[in-house]
Amino acid sequence: MYIADLHIHSKYSRATSKDMTPEILAKYAKEKGVSLLGTGDAIHPKYLEELKEKLKPTSRYGIYEYDGVDFILSGEISNIYSQDGKLRKIHTVLLYPDFESVKAVQKKLAPYGSIFADGRPIFGLSLKKTIELVREVSDEIMIIPAHIWTPWFSLFGSNSGFDSIEECCGELSDEIIALETGLSSDPPMNWRLSALDKYTLVSNSDAHSPSRIGREANVFAHPVDFNELREILKNEDSTRFLFTIEFFPEEGKYHYDGHRNCKVSLHPRESIKLHNVCPVCGRPLTVGVLHRVEDLADRPEGFRPPGKIGYKNLVPLDEIIADALEVGKESKRVRAEYENMVKHLGPELEILLQIPYEDMEGRVNEKIIEGIRMVREGKVKVVPGYDGVYGKIEIFPKQETKQMSLF
């Protein structure tokens, strides 16, 4: 397996760990089993200089290396602008083939916002205009709308997005090479929209701290270079792109509708009955991903278009260990058990996906093995997230569930 997590952030982004540096990211990537990691925030001038100093080119075009881990130049940008009488807020991931193209995009976008202010800079121009400017630099740069269903900052967001890609990007819609599902949606939810059939779906962690890389990712059959990755995504090649790693979408922090301050969480059916008004405070609810998919879907649940890339829902290993041992996820006991498993069995994602149970026996607590089995078989209970609150996973029915940390 060659596992790629293409969307993360660096220490130069707001609300991000100071440990998001190439050195620490490479360490965690090995622990997680992530083979190819997006640098994140490549457009930030200080980070770009740091990357130029630390990353070394490989024999594969557009792929760099640090301490045995592959990196690809990447970064998320934020477009905030008005269109058709509505304020739009859209996040987009760009993947660059080389440092020269990053510098050129910096120069193109700098007049529209500060590239120094944040690792994820804000630009006051439309996504369509951004695509035009990026294409003036290079036809190779990959354009991927990020977490496309998130209410506040996404292409289909209920509060600031559009009802179609064409409404947003017009004749440049075909310049988009893939769509990122985000933590609150998974491929089956996206398959309900026939308009998305021509786009490959990818999943990434959007990590703000090293421990969160790989929580969603993409699994390829073998190492790729920049051009091969672009070709795979453009053609949705299932012989080389094997599957995506997904949260259970209910775990995402915008799956259901709700109000965080009022502690109100509602399935879309309930929200519709209430005319999308909070029953506690009387204000409009934050409409979540599931509701938004229902609004735009033209297919029933369970429909799968032919030729689409598969997926697997996982729960992070430290959460499984914590549930099995009935302790907090941040406890020393969980960390010790995690390190023991990684040392003797292999990286986290290999443990979760493919290490045989018999190889774990005698080395791992039996209840942890049972937890891994239940996750692989999808036998978990999830309390859906809403309005910025992550969902809660319940692996063992009699155990009190644990609230996930923000990142």
Image (cartoon, rainbow, N blue to C red):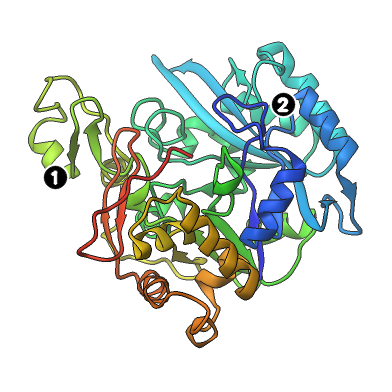
Q: Is residue 370 left or right of residue 78?
A: left
Q: Is residue 258 left or right of residue 388?
A: left
In the rendered image, the residue lying farthest to the bottom is 358
- Mark 2 closeness class: few <14, some 14–19, many ≥20 residues within 10 Å: some
- Residue 359 appears in the figure: yes
Q: Is residue 404 left or right of residue 1?
A: left
Type of amino acid at the residue the image marks with label 1: Arg
> In front here: 297 or 259?
259
Image vertical order of residue 388 relative to residue 7, above or below: above
Image vertical order of residue 61 relative to residue 158, above or below: below
Local secondary structure at mark 2: helix
Q: Is residue 388 left or right of residue 19?
A: left
Classify residue 159 by image quadrant: top left
Which mark is drawn over residue 269? 1
Pinpoint residue 191: horizontal percent, then vertical percent.
Answer: 39, 58
Type of amino acid at the residue the image marks with label 2: Leu
Local secondary structure at mark 1: helix
Q: Give the mark toward the camera: 1 or 2.
A: 1
Pick whichever of labels 1 and 2 is earlier in the sequence: 2
What residue is rendered at 43% in x and 47% in y? 183
- Mark 1 closeness class: few <14, some 14–19, many ≥20 residues within 10 Å: few
Q: Quadrant of the N terminus?
A: bottom right
Residue receiving disc 2: 133
Pinpoint residue 223: horizontal percent, then vertical percent.
Answer: 76, 66
Cα distance between the residues tagged 1 and 2: 42 Å
What residue is rendered at 19% in x and 43% in y? 268
- Residue 246 appears in the figure: no
Which mark is drawn over residue 331? none
Pinpoint residue 124: horizontal percent, then vertical percent.
Answer: 58, 15
Image vertical order of residue 255 relative to residue 130, above or below: below
